[in-house]
Amino acid sequence: MSTPPFEILEHTADVGLRAFGATLPEVFVNAARGMLALALERADDETGAVRPEKSRRLSARGDDNEELLVHFLSEVLYALDTEGWRFAEFRIRKLEGNVIEAEGWGRQAEYSEHSRVAVKAVTYHQVSVQKQNGEWEAVVYFDI
């Protein structure tokens, strides 16, 4: 049985997740997927699918992998909150040093078209990105 791409973590005031990936780009993608699973109550149809109609560039900088993850997820959350983006998938174009360049595929929705859970911000609380036993793991918490 393969490891799921992410799991939800309980916390007294926030909500978190632990994302997994065989590579660093994969763990960033799975963290973004996990955050969207928390932030959106439903997708486009009863199957849970979001149609990848068009793309949006996403980029962030950070001094280390933890800061880079927080900034990347904050960019995804910004696109959701301010532009109505509902992402179906992500492609990491570059993840080197302190820069990530990605592309999110999905569609833009009217605010009334989707229900939001109050994910207000990505936090630095207990954030970690590390390689363990040959697999990458990221832990991140969100202010709700």
Image: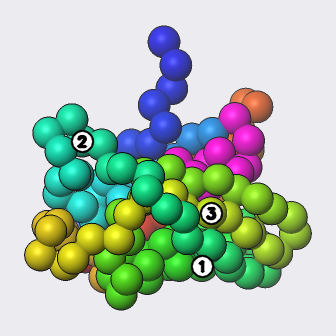
Q: Quadrant of the C terminus?
A: bottom left
Residue at the far top: name it: 1
Report, in whole angstroms, how far the alpha carbon at label 3 lies from the one at label 2.
Answer: 21 Å
Q: Nearer the viewer, mark 2 or mark 1?
A: 2
| Nearer-N-terminus badge (3/2) | 2
Residue at the far right: name it: 97
Q: Residue at 86% of width from left, 64% of height from top?
A: 96
Looking at this view, is 59 or 44 the one in front? 44
Picture disc at residue 105: none
Q: Secondary structure at mark 1?
A: helix
> Does the segment drawn in magenta span residue 115?
no
- The three-letter amino acid code for the residue at tag 1 is His
- In this figure, which residue is indicated by the disc labeled 3? 103
- In this figure, which residue is indicated by the disc labeled 1? 71
Residue 98 sits in which quadrant?
bottom right
Looking at the magenta stretch, what is its main secondary structure?
Answer: helix
- In this figure, which residue is indicated by the disc labeled 2? 48
Q: Secondary structure at mark 2?
A: loop
- Cβ–Cβ under 8 Å for marks 3 and 2: no
Residue 83 sits in which quadrant?
bottom left
Q: Nearer the viewer, mark 1 or mark 3?
A: 3
| Nearer-N-terminus badge (1/3) | 1
Residue at the far bottom: name it: 82
Residue range highlighted in magenta: 22-31
Q: Residue at 32% of width from left, 76% of height from top?
A: 84
| Nearer-N-terminus badge (2/1) | 2
Q: Position of residue 112 (x, y in %)?
A: 12, 75
> In the figure, is residue 80 to the left or right of 62?
left
Q: Position of residue 22 (x, y in %)?
A: 69, 35
